[in-house]
Amino acid sequence: MHQPRRSTLAALLIYIAVVKAMPFLLSHFGLDTTRESTVYLWGLTPVFALGIFGVARFRQLGTAMLLPLLAWFCGDLLIGAAMGYDWVFYPGWFMTYLGFAALCFSGLLLRKSSAMPQVLATSLLGSVLFFLVSNFGSWCWDIGEAYPRTLSGLMTCYIAGIPFYKMHLISTLAFSALLFSPLGENFLLTTHAEASDESHADDLVRQPVVVTRVG
């Protein structure tokens, strides 16, 4: 297991939050960001791949889970600031986070072995879990009653969610392949020597300073 590069991880988390909120911020200023428009690629985000990668590679599972969720939440706060918080904290909004957590947990399958076919299969599994859980929440807490509380209504809800899901799936597979590649791992993970140096530096910072009075 490894420690993440702090500066790289921080930059990536900020990028995730901004990318999530960007279409809403652009729309707030009058730019066309509808899904039919080519101005913005909806769903093109590394957040799901990072959740899987963190659980698979980071030493601390809590950090691996919470940091991507925090970036996602910060993106929601930015959306709320631009469009109103009812856009993000609607009935059943927590099911999206539950689906995200389920996706992250799929990374446990890669903690011992992460050959590229396994990475892609796990990314597909995690993406499907997110799709099923988040859209189940949309069906359960549908305030517009567009989907009847029947099996047929649930299937209609899932079918309606497919256009939103396609780019999420593509970006999760692509970013997972990148993050689990040697290039991605060198970019995000510290070497043993670097981790040792960081630990030594932290020990020096925490070390008490002894002042000796002379005379």
Image (spheres, rainbow, N blue to C red):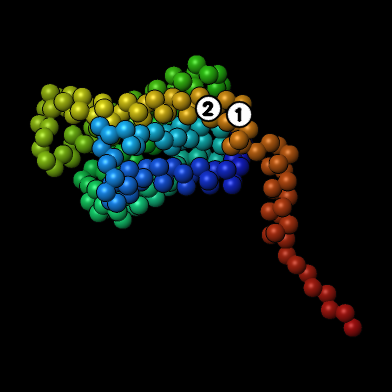
Query: Residue 4: horizontal and vertical position, in percent?
Result: 59, 40
Label 1 SS = helix
* Residue receiving disc 1: 183
Where's residue 126, x and y in %? Answer: 39, 27
Q: Position of residue 100 (x, y in %)?
A: 37, 36
Q: Residue at x 35, y 52 (%)?
A: 78
Asked if residue 129 shows in the view, the reply is no
Give the SS element for disc 2: helix
Q: Quadrant of the C terminus?
A: bottom right
**Residue drawn at (75%, 67%), measured in percent from left and top?**
209
x and y percent of residue 92 in the render? Answer: 23, 43
Q: Is residue 18 left or right of residue 178?
A: left
Instruction: First in sequence, mark 1 or 2: give its number.
Output: 2
Q: Residue furthest right?
A: 215
User: Residue 155, can we see it?
Assistant: yes
Quadrant of res 3: top right
Looking at the image, do the residues carrying marks 1 and 2 touch, with CB atoms under 8 Å apart? yes
- How many marks on residues? 2
Residue located 49% across and 22% down the image: 119
Q: Quadrant of residue 182?
A: top right
**Distance of mark 1 from mark 2, alpha carbons?**
7 Å
Mark drawn on residue 178:
2
